[in-house]
Image (cartoon, grey):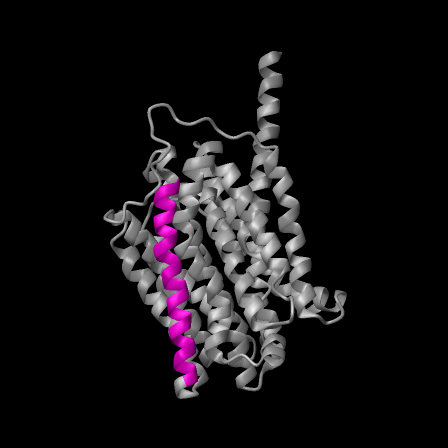
Amino acid sequence: MRAVLSSARADRTSWHLLGLLWVMGVDLRLPILAVPPLLALIHRDLGLSETVVGVLTGLPVFLLAVAAILGSLLIARMSAVRAAAVGLLLVGVASALRGIGPSPVMLLAMTFLMGIGIAVTQPAMPALVSQWFATRVGVATAVYANGILVGEVLASALTLPLVLPLVGGSWEWSFVVWAIPVLLTVPVLGVVPTSPPVVGTSPRRWWPDWRGTATLRLGLTLGGASAAYFGSNAFIPEFLRATGRSDLIGPCLTALNAGQLPASVLVACLSSRMIGKREPLVASGILILAGLAVFLVLPGAGIMLGTAIIGFCTAQIFVLTLAIPPMLVEAHDVHRLSAGMLAVAYACSFTFPLVAGAAWDATHLPITAFLTVAAGSVTAATAAAGLLR
């Protein structure tokens, strides 16, 4: 009888922890993806150039690269749970303060701090999966990745039709609204017990193995996909506005982000057949370029189909690569590999859109903004081709 009760309690705890992982995933994307739907308003009020638009969208991503190592250090010093709580607190507070002024300086400064918070939290997620679900890495990774993808969909789909009218058309206050769910998660993390240190390991192991092939290839695979995804979020609204199709901004962003959701479900259902295999990664990388071609060539609904293909393929690469570190290394080293992988990946995610935005400013050709998607596709497919088996 005691064994049955103990098993029931363990099952309840397992579901609670899976739910918490999912909510944390949502929190990591709500503040970032609230920006693209509002870019036209921010552009109008603050007079931003296309290069600054690229910086605004890419700055949190750049900080994911730079501060991911800080996340690894904090996890080694204070545990993954506490590092995630600190990171989410910073995300919530900085996100809410972005609209003060309104001022370009405050917007960029708070975006900077918000990016650091996300960068600290994200390497903690694979570490928590390894600690809480060592025998179900694929499913747990798919769950929190699904939360990330749902967060992207919610922010993209609801900012204009729901949140903006709710706050009287103020893009500044819409940032506050999206910060609330993030701040509500922090107290929950405060009551989650932390795992004891692993016997025989040093708590000071936090610096990534930059010479490791896995770190570089995983980083470039994820980086190519992330650059394509973030670049699409940044420039699809601007491209449609510049080509006189502003009415398609909302539907396209929704298609881009909603197209990601089936990818996480597919990986959860077929985790044993997909995770650790290079073929799904290479195929997804190639299909990103196919989605871009559909977006640029087909009219009407074809535009949304193209963005949905990009969203699906980038998400599939995202989920598959996040699941690999807990499978490759011991639990006490997952944060190191994850941080190194994320640092490489998000360096690509920041650099590619920035170069594309500068190319648009220099040539005045809107189509040059999609260089980031094309380059991301090639990078992801090429790096994945030499990965795993």
Q: Is residue 122 above or below residue 194?
A: below
Q: Quadrant of residue 324?
A: top left
Q: Can I make out residue 105 in this image? A: yes
Q: Is residue 348 above or below residue 75?
A: below
Q: Residue at x 58, y 78 (%)?
A: 43
In magenta stretch: residue 323: no
Q: Find residue 241 and report its horizontal and vertical position in percent.
A: 56, 82
In magenta stretch: residue 339: yes
Q: Residue at x 42, y 66 (%)?
A: 228
For this rendering, which residue is in front, 97 or 174?
97
Q: Is residue 6 above or below residue 186?
A: above
Q: Most extreme residue toward the top, as rendered?
A: 1
Q: Find residue 8 and report its horizontal and vertical position in percent.
A: 61, 23
Q: Quadrant of residue 366?
A: bottom left
Q: Which residues are magenta?
A: 335-361
For this rendering, which residue is in front, 219 or 291?
219
Look at the image and tell me in which quarter the N terminus lies. top right
Q: Is residue 218 above or below residue 170?
A: above
Q: Find residue 168 and report its horizontal and vertical position in percent.
A: 76, 70
Q: Can I make out residue 158 in this image? A: no
Dominant secondary structure of the residues highlighted in magenta in the image: helix
Q: Residue at x 45, y 80 (%)?
A: 297
Q: Residue at x 52, y 30 (%)?
A: 194
For this rendering, which residue is in front, 192 or 141?
192
Q: Find residue 66 and report its horizontal and vertical position in percent.
A: 39, 56
How many labels, in total?
0
Q: Is residue 97 left or right of residue 116?
A: right
